[in-house]
Amino acid sequence: MTVSAPGQQGIAIVTGAGSGIGLATVRLLVGRGWHVAAVDRDRQSMVRLKEELGSRILTICGDVTDSQVRDRTMQEVAVRWGGALDLLVNNAGLLWSGDFRSQSDESIETVLSVNNLAVAHWSKAAFPLLQASVQAGRRPAVVNLSSVAALYGIPSLAIYSASKFWVCGFTEALSVEWARQGIAVRDVMPPFVETPMFEGPLKDNPFARKLGAHITAEMVARQIVAAAGGAPLHRLVSLRFRLAYLIARLVPGGLVRIGLKMIYGQGS
């Protein structure tokens, strides 16, 4: 089999491509010779991206929770680039910060729809194109964006944190199911990243203030492309949070909760 990632030309779909990690991933892939379908609900960001990257990119403006947007993306990718897909990056995500009791029902449903249901639906819709890549002798991959918020439930980010646990579980299950089909499924787990999300809904979050954002979207994009090319199943972006991952696995849960309470401002 020939390998389409990383560093070799392939066909990719990236959701949430208008800014932050998604935008950095699109730029990196195109710079390495890939053809990329970029999907985002922000029309102006898609116009700017098309002007910047030209013919190697297909821009789709729409919400990832819309089945018509999803189906149109798959159809246009198939028609334009021969019916095969080498990489699906499920990057689109939403975050709400604050006490859970203050989060509206609509916000809860929207976050879960984007962070979870869309990941499932886009993966399933992409399967025929990914399978066509296998049949062409390539090794396609699905890379999902999880978070270090999936290491332990984070107060003030309850729904977001739970949604990223879901992403990890979904990735683990699908990685086994689709391995038999020749399709790799992995996730990337970044900490707080220097993106518009950090300056927006996370601006006043106690954990964001305490931990800060020490990595860039470009750093995460490189890890996404690396994940497309090989293990591990869960790829933590920085050494600092690899250590945090180990600590969360080794330290008794009660001690972890004490640390979370201290950061959240409840004392020990």
Image (tube, rainbow, N blue to C red):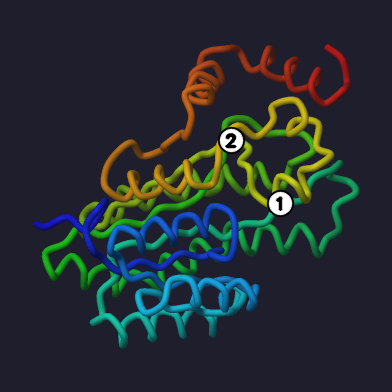
Label 1 secondary element:
loop
Q: CA distance from mark 2 to mark 1?
A: 13 Å
- Nearer to us in this view, 105 or 64: 64
Label 2 secondary element:
loop
Query: Which quarter of the picture shows residue 157?
Result: top right
- According to the image, label 1 marks what residue? 95
Query: From what the image shows, is residue 191 above or below residue 93?
Result: above
- Nearer to us in this view, 22 or 267: 22
**The N terminus lies in quadrant:** bottom left
Task: Tell me which residue sits at (55%, 41%) in the image.
Answer: 216
Query: From what the image shows, is residue 152 above or below residue 11?
Result: above
Mark 2 surroundings: few (<14), some (14-19) or many (≥20) residues within 10 A: many
Task: Tell me which residue sits at (63%, 78%) in the image.
Answer: 43
Q: Position of residue 58 (x, y in %)?
A: 42, 78
Task: Tell me which residue sits at (57%, 42%) in the image.
Answer: 165
Amino acid at circle 1: Leu
Q: Position of residue 219 (x, y in %)?
A: 47, 41
Query: Which quarter of the picture shows residue 164?
Result: top right
Q: Position of residue 158 (x, y in %)?
A: 74, 42
Mark 1 surroundings: few (<14), some (14-19) or many (≥20) residues within 10 A: many
**Front tag of 2 and 1:** 2
Task: Tell me which residue sits at (60%, 12%) in the image.
Answer: 252
Q: In this image, 200 relative to 229: left or right?
A: right
Mark sitting on residue 44: none
Query: From what the image shows, is residue 139 above or below residue 66?
Result: above
- According to the image, label 2 marks what residue? 191
